[in-house]
């Protein structure tokens, strides 16, 4: 019944470009602070988080309880000779399949695999990264049953790359957006749920579903009312207001994680919800 109601909501409200739709209730939750949470995954009842702030740790959290602790330190697993290419940690996404962790290390242009206390590079992508402009792989999503990994290049252009995990070869590359004319251009994360592929659009505050047959994106959830909870002054004088960086899809709700740095401040809208920069904020939207 929940699935039927969700589809009705989408059909009824998807034509409203700036209205919220696709969810019935919301809740803000706070956990112990991790600077600049950039990736999140839910596996066997626990959340696993990573940061893009040169942090080598994978953090574990039991059902979004207050306490969050590092469970794996990638730097401690590295062979100083064999794995010297890793060094810089810019983890933008994390996925787990069959007890194996996969991390997108954007700055170095690689996908890391962490298995049985060992880390190695299983896939490298060329000509997709730009350290100065942050345009590399921002999200990874895994269909564990089909052994497919979907890589999403964030913007300029926005690409979807399908990788066969059995041989680590690229099967297909699709250009989703080729310019910055749409706010959907900036994709910050991707997830597979029941064989369906979803994207989190940072600037638009929207979650879309990708159609494998047509290549079209269908808006499923819009949360624009929460699009300006935080802000940060950039070096060029502009103000950054979009911080939704990662998401996890459950059967009855979606969790959205915000990427907060030490220079981020809470807006009046955020203050009205009791938010603070002293914790990691999660927005849960219930279908």
Image (cartoon, grey):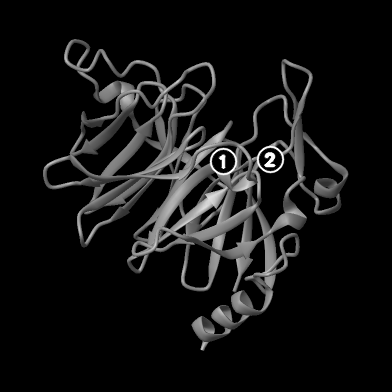
**C-beta proximity under 8 Å, tags 2 and 1:** yes
Of residues 144 and 36, the one nearer the viewer is: 144
* Left or right, residue 73 beside residue 198: left
Which secondary structure lies at badge 1? Answer: loop
Quadrant of image for the C terminus: bottom right
- What percent of the width, then of the height, locates residue 285? 62, 65
* Left or right, residue 210 beside residue 218: left
Of residues 255 and 244, the one nearer the viewer is: 244
Q: How many marks?
A: 2
- Residue 242 numbered tag: 2
Residue ID at (47%, 21%): 54
Residue carrying label 1: 186
Categorize mark 2 by other alpha carbons within 10 Å: few (<14), some (14-19), many (20+): many
- For marks 2 and 1 on the same chain, the one whose residue lies earlier in the sequence: 1
Tell me the mark number nearer the camera, choosing from 2 and 1.
1
Residue ID at (76%, 34%): 231
- What percent of the width, then of the height, locates residue 97? 26, 52
Residue ID at (54%, 21%): 133
Of residues 186 and 101, the one nearer the viewer is: 186
* Left or right, residue 217 beside residue 226: left
Of residues 14 and 215, the one nearer the viewer is: 215
Residue ID at (52%, 86%): 4
- What percent of the width, then of the height, locates residue 239? 77, 28
Residue farthest toward the left in the current orientation of the protein: 167
92 is higher (above) or lower (below) than 6: above
Q: Quadrant of residue 280?
A: top right
């Amino acid at each position: 019944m929940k699935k039927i109601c969700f589809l009705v909501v989408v059909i009824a409200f998807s034509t409203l470009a700036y209205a919220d739709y696709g969810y019935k209730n919301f809740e803000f939750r706070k956990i112990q602070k991790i600077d600049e949470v950039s990736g999140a995954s839910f596996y066997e009842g626990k959340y696993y988080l990573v940061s893009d702030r040169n942090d080598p740790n994978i953090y574990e959290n039991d059902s979004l309880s207050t306490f969050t602790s590092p469970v794996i330190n990638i730097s401690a697993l590295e062979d100083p000779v064999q794995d010297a290419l890793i060094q810089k940690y810019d983890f933008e996404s994390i996925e787990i399949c069959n007890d194996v962790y996969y991390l997108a290390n954007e700055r170095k242009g690689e996908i890391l695999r962490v298995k049985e206390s060992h880390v190695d590079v299983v896939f490298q992508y060329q000509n997709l990264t730009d350290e100065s402009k942050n345009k590399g792989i921002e999200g990874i999503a895994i269909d564990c049953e089909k052994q497919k990994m979907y890589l999403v290049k964030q913007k300029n252009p926005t690409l979807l790359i399908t990788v066969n995990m059995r041989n680590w070869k690229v099967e297909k590359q699709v250009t989703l957006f080729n310019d910055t004319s749409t706010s959907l251009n900036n994709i910050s994360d991707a997830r597979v749920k029941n064989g369906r592929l979803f994207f989190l659009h940072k600037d638009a505050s929207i979650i879309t579903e990708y159609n494998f047959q047509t290549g079209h994106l269908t808006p499923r959830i819009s949360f624009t009312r929460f699009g300006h909870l935080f802000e940060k002054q950039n070096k060029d004088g502009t103000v950054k207001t979009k911080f939704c960086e990662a998401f996890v899809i459950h059967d009855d709700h979606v969790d959205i994680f915000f990427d907060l740095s030490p220079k981020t401040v809470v807006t009046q809208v955020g203050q009205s919800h009791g938010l603070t920069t002293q914790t990691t904020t999660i927005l849960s939207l219930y279908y």
